[in-house]
Amino acid sequence: GAGVSQSPSNKVTEKGKDVELRCDPISGHTALYWYRQSLGQGLEFLIYFQGNSAPDKSGLPSDRFSAERTGGSVSTLTIQRTQQEDSAVYLCASSPDRVGGEAFFGQGTRLTVV
Amino acid sequence: DAKTTQPNSMESNEEEPVHLPCNHSTISGTDYIHWYRQLPSQGPEYVIHGLTSNVNNRMASLAIAEDRKSSTLILHRATLRDAAVYYCILRRGSQGNLIFGKGTKLSVKP
């Protein structure tokens, strides 16, 4: 597809379970970003990839959160032992490696922990 | 990353110009000024970016102060569809991170 694709679009999980969220960036985009947004709040930065490496993962809230990117393309955000406060919309974006390259966002994954 | 400061909210009347300010006093020479907006229930979308010179595109204009410590996003004729949260972000060169602040919530009155 032409845009950033995220799956699943909705995920309901029980507290304590692990979840994996997937992001397919636009082909050729070297930068990939993960954010989360709670209801009525701003975008909270989680992690930033350049290619397969993550120069900035300072936003990951705890060691329950991890992310990887393979082949400079698909990225997976994993949340272990989910808690209710993890409930949010998780947004992924990608951008090309050029000055001013605009970031394109996916539609997000709405995660609900019950 | 250098920080930006924006007003929490602004109001505008439909079909009038809107000037959204952003302060970035600690900007460095390689920081580009980016603006994104987030419409209700949608992901953010790119609006415009610039380095030193003023920029125009089909969505908006970006006016950058000579010392680059502030900038203003200009919507020439606000429409109801422009009601959104507008984010001013500094991004370093071509490989910098994109950190969103709280942004300015723009309300447009008919």
Image (cartoon, coloured by chain):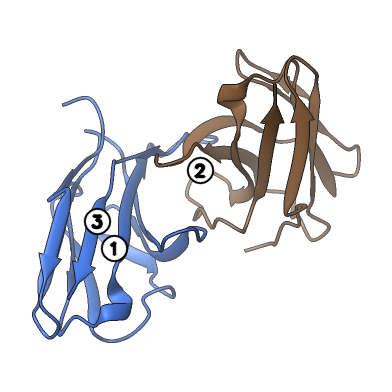
Chain colours: A blue, B brown
Q: Residue B61 appears at what percent x and percent y?
A: 72, 22
Mark 3 or mark 1, whichever is nearer to me? 3
Please give the residue where the numbered disc 3 appears in the rendered image.
Answer: A110
B46, above or below A106, in the image: above
Q: CA distance from mark 2 to mark 1?
A: 16 Å
| Badge 2 and badge 3 in a common chain | no
Q: Quadrant of residue A14 in the image?
A: bottom left
Q: Residue A10 appears at what percent x and percent y?
A: 16, 53
Please give the residue where the numbered disc 2 appears in the rendered image.
Answer: B94
The crowding category of the residue bearing disc 1, from other C-alpha atoms within 10 Å (few below 14, some 14 to 19, many at least 20), is some
Please give the residue where the numbered disc 1 appears in the rendered image.
Answer: A53
What's the chain of the residue with tag 2? Answer: B
What's the chain of the residue with tag 1? Answer: A
Quadrant of the drawing holding the N terminus of chain B: bottom right
Q: Quadrant of residue A1 in the image?
A: top left
Describe the element under mark 2 as helix, strand or loop: loop
Which of A30/A109 is in front?
A: A109
Describe the element under mark 1 as helix, strand or loop: strand
Task: Say which amino acid is labelled 3.
Answer: Arg
A43, above or below B45, in the image: below
Mark carried by residue A75: none
Q: Residue B82 appears at what percent x and percent y?
A: 60, 27
